[in-house]
Image: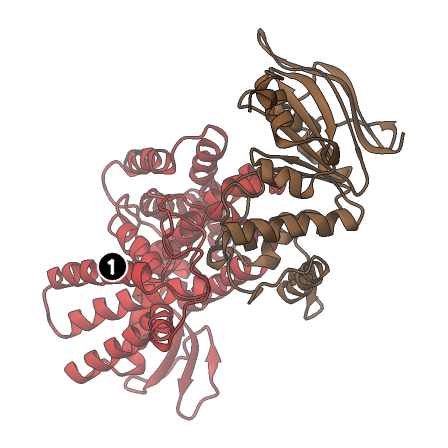
Amino acid sequence: MSSEPRAGAGPRAGTRGKAASFLGGHWIYLFLVLEVIYFSLRTGGFASLNALQILLYYGVQVFLLSIAELFVIATGGIDLSVGYILGFASIISIKFMEWMAPLGLGEPLTVLFGVLATLVVGLIPGLVNGWLVAYLKVPPFIATFSMLGVCHGVSELIINGVYAMGLPKLAADIGSGHFLYVTRGLAPSFFSRPVVDRGVKVLEIVPDIVVVTAVVVCILAFALGRTRFGRHVYAIGGNVDAATRAGIPVKRRLLGVYAMSSFLASLAGIVYAFMYVSGKADAGASLLLDSIAAVVIGGASLFGGTGTVQRTMIGALILAVLDLGLRMAGTPTFDKYILVGVILIFAVVIERYMPEARK
Amino acid sequence: MDYILETRGITKRFGGLTAVDNVSIGLRAGEALAVLGDNGAGKSTLIKVISGVHKPDEGEILIGGKRARIESPMDALAQGIETIYQDLALAENLDVGANIFLGRERMRRSLGIVNVLDDGGMADEAKKVLDRLDIHIPSLRSTIRTLSGGQRQAVAISRSIYWDAKVLIMDEPTAALGVAEQKKVLNLVRTLKDQGIGIIIISHQMYDVFEVADRLAVMRRGVLVGERIVKETNADEVVGLIVGSETVGKER
């Protein structure tokens, strides 16, 4: 771990130091606002409810994965397997529902049991990761990198190299449905789209899966910021020896963190299946780097002990706005890769040279 | 004998090496006992036996005159023996209150349904214990990373005191500090003594020993080679005991 030349310097003196510290702590909010303004000016449709909903809708996987990654990174670890756990879960959720369909339980129960079974099985990769890291002292990079390969291989074996298909219609409806529908001349309806004549405009507000994601994100923000579990996560990332000597059950906590990461990745996989009505092994392959990038842009150190859910979400939003904005502006996607790289480096440099006074 | 902590015939072997050989020492309330010795003399091993890290092969530990079972660091903590290691074991990314309550976090009920961390309450308690020790830290909500070495040492000490230490073991408490900070920590040790806490200091700094310790015990190759009352000895004699040549003092 790097030594801290700024340690022991006492409170930073002078307004310049204060300004730098403020900027270090708040630049991501400023950056997000500037980004939104830029794309709003550049492309006509960007500043609209529709664009916002699309942004959130297609962002849910990265939102969930980045929070999963945040908890692991806050302990000083890393979880490289989340992307392929997502793919694995997208496949097994559909398979479970396919297997249960002939039982005649009806669609609601089939979907419910399919989701629950996937979440339970989805814990397994995380429990193995956590067991390897906490009890066998395997470096997180190696443990989760191996799990990435295992999940990828197992997924491909299940589907034999094709897509998993056959999601019940109800699940697909949830995946494309909205929380609230407002139609002129009708009472607003929740969750189900009113039957209207062709041409009548129905205003759709907040996709279902965005509501689910928002609830999960709020619970996790609470867990990391306000509970004993969250405090222990920070303590382990800050000084694992101190945590151990203070009587914190470090191994159990690490097991919990990796299991939770895997659980969230599985949830993201289920959501993927509901959205795209298919499951595939590499569904989340490209999302791993985005989720780590969101955490780092949010100001968390890869050495552990820092980072919040709120700021990680801002980091994820910065990436989501960039993605959608460039798409709408008709810029090739390669531009996004370059820009993400530049923003990442910028984030790390700011964190290093303009540290926020408090955590 | 009114010892609050006493070891009788403690022996600890590692394979063929006898790290601590039949050592008996006692500590009274409000007294500072310095344990001195060259590297490898067995000081640290003795301390680790008392704080529950090592199990002794022979001998016993008495607390308040009664035989105590100390088989793990948690046993020692539960019986009021707190140890401050040289690295202090603080989480630098957390604030003062969070560190004092690390692993024993205080919770409060929020909205009548869920328990949340009581950061405000922990900061208040931290302030109380820091005041009791006359320690001033500019902001209790700033992280340990922003504090100086002496302030960190003070936080580590406060943590032990908050949890009702009867005996405080300090491993090289001033080793990493500047001169002004060393003085502050030594003052802190005096304050603790006044409050009736027994202190065992392991130190290489002869100055520390003569500043705050009441008695000193010198170890050499695992054996207790001498105990002196600080007022009745001098640095030369102590150095002689440490290196094993009682003539050192006379050569000058």
Q: Colour of chain B?
A: brown
Q: Quadrant of the N terminus of chain A?
A: top left
Give the farthest residue toward the bottom. Answer: A185
Q: Secondary structure at mark 1?
A: helix
In the figure, is residue A5 to the left or right of A11?
Answer: left
Q: Position of residue A182 (x, y in %)?
A: 41, 85
Residue in view at x 50 percent, y 30 percent? A135
Q: Nearer the viewer, residue B160 or A218?
A: B160
Q: Colour of chain A?
A: red
Residue in view at x 18 percent, y 84 percent? A41
Q: Which residue is mark 1?
A: A344
Visible residue check, residue B53? no
Q: Nearer the viewer, residue A301 or B53?
A: B53
Mark 1, other Cα within 10 Å: few <14 / some 14–19 / many ≥20? some
The quarter of the displayed image where residue B3 is located: top right
Q: Position of residue A123 (x, y in %)?
A: 47, 42
In the figure, is residue A108 to the left or right of A322?
Answer: right
Amino acid type, residue under disc 1 in the picture: Leu
